[in-house]
Amino acid sequence: MDASSALRKTVLLARDGLAIQNRLEFSGDIVQKVLQLEELTAATTIFIYVDFRSEVQTHLLIAELLRQGKKVVVPVTLVKTKTLLPGFLQRSAAGIIGILMG
């Protein structure tokens, strides 16, 4: 294993080891800081990841961006072809979020 892979493994283990309460708190702090960025305020379209496993949770940020009327784009992985495509999130009147492939 090279140094880069070893470092990645160490960081992932540390992140995975965080207590859920700490992860939620850290995620909330990050979301609040991101929402205050001038670049975000000025933007009409935002490309953001959807959290997976122990990553910083982005679902509250995504919901707020949609509430603000921003266009939200997320990466969609096509596993068979190992391809990433942009997916445009849309919220229905019922609050359900769907992905439109663009």
Image: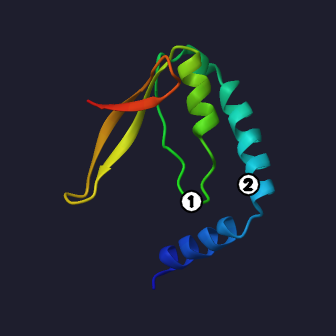
Mark 2 or 1 closer to N-term?
A: 2
Q: Quadrant of the C terminus?
A: top left
Instruction: Say above or below: 86 vs 66.
Output: below
Name the residue rendered at 62%, 32% in the picture.
61
Label 1 packing within 10 angstroms: few (<14), some (14-19), many (20+): few
For the residue pair 72 and 10, the one nearer the viewer reads as 72
Q: Label 2 vs label 1: CA separation?
A: 11 Å
Task: Identify the mark at residue 53; answer none if there is no mark.
Answer: 1
Instruction: Say above or below: 98 vs 68.
Output: below
Instruction: Say above or below: 29 vs 2.
Output: above
Instruction: Say above or below: 52 vs 65.
Output: below
- Quadrant for residue 1, please give it: bottom left
Residue 9 place in picture, x, y as percent: 56, 75
Task: Identify the mark at residue 23; answer none if there is no mark.
Answer: 2
Name the residue rendered at 54%, 70% in the picture.
8
For the residue pair 52 and 95, the one nearer the viewer reads as 95
Amino acid, disc 1: Arg
In the rendered structure, are the residues bearing label 2 and label 1 in contact, judged by CB atoms less than 8 Å apart?
no
Amino acid, disc 2: Arg
Label 2 packing within 10 angstroms: few (<14), some (14-19), many (20+): some
Name the residue rendered at 59%, 41% in the picture.
58
Name the residue rendered at 74%, 40% in the picture.
28
